[in-house]
Each structure stands twice: as structure tokens, then as C-alpha cells.
Image: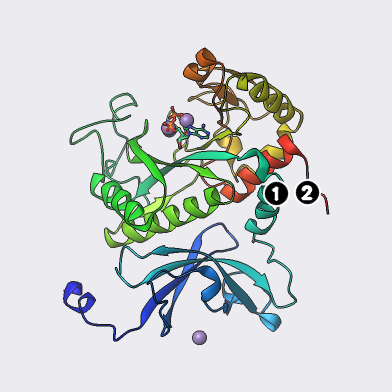
Amino acid sequence: MLLKYMRLDQKGSAMAEYIWIDAVGHVRSKSKTITQLPENGEFKPEDLPVWNFDGSSTDQAPGDNSDVYLRPVAVFPDPMRGVPNILVLSECWNADGTPNKFNHRYECAKLMEAHAEHTPWFGLEQEYTLFDMEDRPYGWPKNGFPAPQGPYYCGVGAGRVMCRDIVDAHYKACLYSGVKISGTNAEVMPAQWEFQVGPCEGIEMGDHLWIARFLLHRVAEEFGAKISVQPKPIPGDWNGAGLHSNFSTKEMRVEGGMKHIEAAIKKLEGRHQEHIAVYGEGNELRLTGRHETGSIDQFSYGVANRGASIRIPRECAAKGYGYFEDRRPASNADPYQITGIIMETVFGPVKE
Ligand code: ADP
Ligand code: MN
Ligand code: MN
Ligand code: MN
Ligand code: MN
């Protein structure tokens, strides 16, 4: 049905889907017609108009001063609508020219710029759970629970994995859009999956992860499934969902890098609580020290240790250089806040 309309000629105009992050860390979006197309077909953020939305409807502004401005910061091809249509990731700005309270990209970009000489790379592992329209994990029995965890992680076959169609549609959509998705896998809890984005340099990490999240919600919408990024969607003996954050600098990636990795981990230890504060809501339900997590109250690290706050991959320890994994962030954390605070802790705040 839809296809016959999607094939219609747009008479030289493009549809631009402006995307932003709301007060609860969900994505919102609305569409704008662009009548002036760039000659080479490649839109740049600075060529696109600043737009606005009603911030009182999203808890991002008071009703008596409700306009919030959308400033385009990154453009991606739109996999739902195809050429020449685009996705326009935007920052939220207040009418008085200050960044909106929920615009975490602004501070993050400053930190990335201040320390760009270290060429920071990030790779984020986004875990999430698919829910049906009755808010049950997709494919779980109406009464009771599936068999205990064990067969589901990287599972293959009916009864072991759910919704592979959504996962693959999302994977394709990311590749089409140029999102640096690096893989997917079924997770330990049934109806839970993961995708990885990275390595990405600097601010690109947050931009690509947010577009990947948008695409996931958007694809799942078509299949009638909900995406949950709750850190502990089902209480009890079911794994929670995280956003493991892998990090390296150019100093860590070459011979002798391990001393830079260890120095960074020492700095992270000194600011454990500050990190936890921005590593997601409800993370205390997940970081229990069980189910492949470290305790929320205690910083720890180790080689190949999935029960620690920070894991140095076995291969990196053996080589003596590479990257490390911060396992603390919850699946609902904001990648700008995560990557921003890692930069601040390792290299210091931005000097004004
Ligand atoms: P895990 O074994 O923890 O499940 P994954 O394979 O799911 O690991 O994810 C590893 C992530 O680490 C990927 O997103 C990848 O892009 C990222 N990564 C790999 N090398 C580096 C690096 N040098 N610096 C930062 N991130 C990296
Ligand atoms: Mn209106
Ligand atoms: Mn992983
Ligand atoms: Mn995982
Ligand atoms: Mn991991």
C-alpha cells in the first residue's frame, strides 16, 4: 500500500525529518519540506534552516515561553523515505540563546574539541529489550516466564530468539544511513538484543548512537513492537541492559599504551560517583554485582572480568595496548554525557 505513494515524484523537494532528544531521553521528530536542494545532493547541517517546536508539549520549556529552537548538527540519508530525503539531528536551544537543559551535546562537543589532539575513539554497545503492545517482553508466555537464561545469548532458532526481522531491518537501515554500526547480537535475556556502534571519533559517537536509537524506534514502530531501554526491565534472575562504553586515545592504541590505559582507569576510580550520576536512571537495579555487573557502590577493574566496573579486554592486556571497556553505563544513559564525562575525567574540564 505505502509503496505506491513512496514512489511518487517529489517535484524537486526533499523531506527533512528533524530529530531531537526530549526531557526523558527519548527521541522526537517532525518533518519539514526543503525546496532548495544542494547541487551535489549532499546536505550539510549549516545549509538547513534552524526550526522550532513547542517545548511545553515535551516538558522542555514553560507554556508562556514555549519555543525551543532546533539547530541542525548532523545529516543522514533517510532509509524509510529514500533519496533525496534526510534525517536531521538537531540540538535544542532556548529563545534566550542558551542551550536547553536537556541538550547534553553542547557540553560534550566542547570537551571533544578541547581534547581533540588525543583522537578519542568510542564504541558503544546498546542493549535493549523488545516489548509487545501489552508491555510484556516480546514472545514471553502470557502467564509465567520463559525457561531460565542460557540458550538465548547469540541464540539461533524459534523459542530462542525473538524479532530477528526487526534487528536485521534496523541493521540495514543503519548501514544505509551511514551510521557506524559494527554488529548485533541476541542477548542473555530472551527478547533482549544488542547492537554496537563504533569506533567513532569524538562527538560523532553520540550523534551516531542517537540516530541508531531513532532508527530502532522507527523500524520497530512498523512491526508493532516497543523498544525499552530500561536498565532492569524484568526483576529477578534476568539480565539487565547496559550501554558498555569502550574507549581509547591515540596514546593507548600504540605500543606502551597500557600505561595510558592504567592512568585513565585510576582517574575514573577517583570520580566513580560522578560517573554513576550520569550513567542512567535506575542503574542501581542493574549494577548489583550479579548478572555480569560490578557493584554500583564500588569501583573495580580487571582483565577479562565481566563482573568489574572496567574491563581490559584479554587481547589488549596480551598486546600491551588497545582500549578499555567501562561497563557501568545503563542502556538508557545519554551517550553525550557518557563520552563527555570520560573526556573530562581523563583530560580535565574545558578551560574557559
Ligand atoms: P563485548 O565483548 O564487550 O561484547 P563488543 O564486540 O560488543 O564487545 O563491542 C566492542 C566495541 O568496542 C565495539 O563497539 C567496537 O567498535 C569498540 N572498539 C573496538 N576497538 C576500539 C578502540 N580501539 N577504541 C574504542 N572502541 C573500540
Ligand atoms: Mn501546531
Ligand atoms: Mn557486546
Ligand atoms: Mn551485551
Ligand atoms: Mn561489552
Per the rendering, the mark at residue 111 is: 1
Q: Residues within 10 Å of mark 2 (few under 14, many from 20)?
A: some
Does residue 41 lie above or below 221 as drawn?
A: below
User: Residue 1, how many percent across, how many down?
Assistant: 16, 74
Of helix, strand and loop, which one carries label 2? loop
Ligand 1 lies under 8 Å from the Cβ of mark 1? no
Q: Residues within 10 Å of mark 1 (few under 14, many from 20)?
A: many
Counting every numbered tag in the picture gives 2
Of helix, strand and loop, which one carries label 1? helix
Q: CA distance from mark 2 to mark 1?
A: 6 Å
Instruction: Choose between 86 and 148: the one closer to the eye.
Output: 86
- Farthest-out residue, front: 39
The quadrant holding residue 257 is top right
Labels 2 & 1 near each other (Cβ < 8 A): yes
Instruction: Choose between 136 and 12: the one closer to the eye.
Output: 12
Q: Which residue is mark 2?
A: 350
- Farthest-out residue, right: 352
Residue at the location (54% across, 21% down)? 307
User: Residue 25, how many percent across, how many down?
Assistant: 56, 57
Q: Is residue 145 left or right of residue 351?
A: left
